[in-house]
Image (spheres, rainbow, N blue to C red):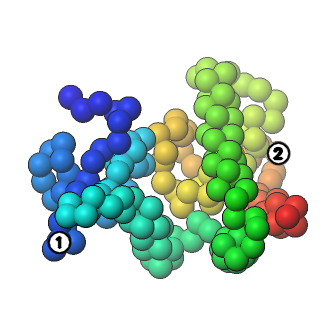
Amino acid sequence: MADDNKPLLIKRYASRRLYNTETSDYVTLDDIAGFIRSGREVQIVDLKSGDDLTRQYLLQIIAEHESRGENVLPVNVLNDLVRAYTTQATSMVPQFLQTSFEMLRESQEKVMETMTPGMKMPGFEAMQAQQEAFLKAMTGGMNWGATQPSETVEKSSEGEDLDDIKKQLAELQDKLSKLK
């Protein structure tokens, strides 16, 4: 059985084919995205030069999802990322993004751990719907290994609909971009 703590090694051949060293078969970008969604880290290296190509392929996976209309990153966030590459902010952006996603995952795990099946908490449905909409917007509907309720909640018990949640998310993104 493979050690899930170490990255799955994928080798890229000169033909640009990607080879999974654990299963000894060729894989696609969609396969690699599936490994990542299931919680597995991957490392992609060029067979001949030994260069690490992981970042290049992960960006390609994101670009393909965006080009299919699975828009996770709003245009203003993409603009901010481009600006970050041309300013002094490049040193703090990666740490900020990493910390933000870690906090998002941890908070979701804590909420799900504290809730037991059938437990009712005032406003929980509203919080759960808001969190699901936020996660769906941030991940394009991809499951990052976190526990999700089986049914989609369109409206919360508080009467907030999905449009209100999207509006709140956009306002938060605007505030974050202004914090620079």
Pick the front one: 79 or 168: 79
Is there any visible trace of residue 28 in the rendered image? no
Left or right, 28 with reference to 25: right
Left or right, 151 with reference to 41: right
Q: Residues within 10 Å of mark 2 (few under 14, many from 20)?
A: few
Label disc, if present, on residue 158 of the rendered structure? 2
When asked about the image quadrant of residue 136, the answer is bottom right
When asked about the image quadrant of residue 18, the answer is bottom left
Mark 1 and mark 2 lie on one chain; the one further toward the N terminus is: 1
Pick the front one: 162 or 38: 38
Is there any visible trace of residue 85 in the rendered image? yes
Q: Residue at 20% of width from left, 51% of height from top?
A: 20
When asked about the image quadrant of residue 61, the answer is bottom left
In x, y percent, where is residue 23?
Answer: 15, 45
Q: CA–CA distance between discs 1 and 2?
A: 57 Å
Three-letter amino acid code of the residue under disc 2: Glu
Q: How many marks?
A: 2
Task: Tell me the quarter of the image containing the C terminus.
Answer: bottom right
Of all residues shown, which one is farthest toward the front?
49
Q: Residues within 10 Å of mark 1 (few under 14, many from 20)?
A: few
Q: Residue at 48% of width from left, 54% of height from top?
A: 142
In x, y percent, where is residue 21?
Answer: 18, 47
In x, y percent, where is residue 174?
Answer: 83, 67
Q: Residue at 63% of width from left, 41% of height from top?
A: 102
In x, y percent, where is residue 143?
Answer: 48, 48
Which residue, given by chain and number where applicable, does mark 1 sit on?
14
User: Is residue 107 positioned above or below 85 on the image?
Assistant: above
Task: Tell me the quarter of the image containing the N terminus.
Answer: top left
SS at mark 2 in the image: loop
User: Is residue 79 positioned above or below 175 on the image?
Assistant: below
Three-letter amino acid code of the residue under disc 1: Ala
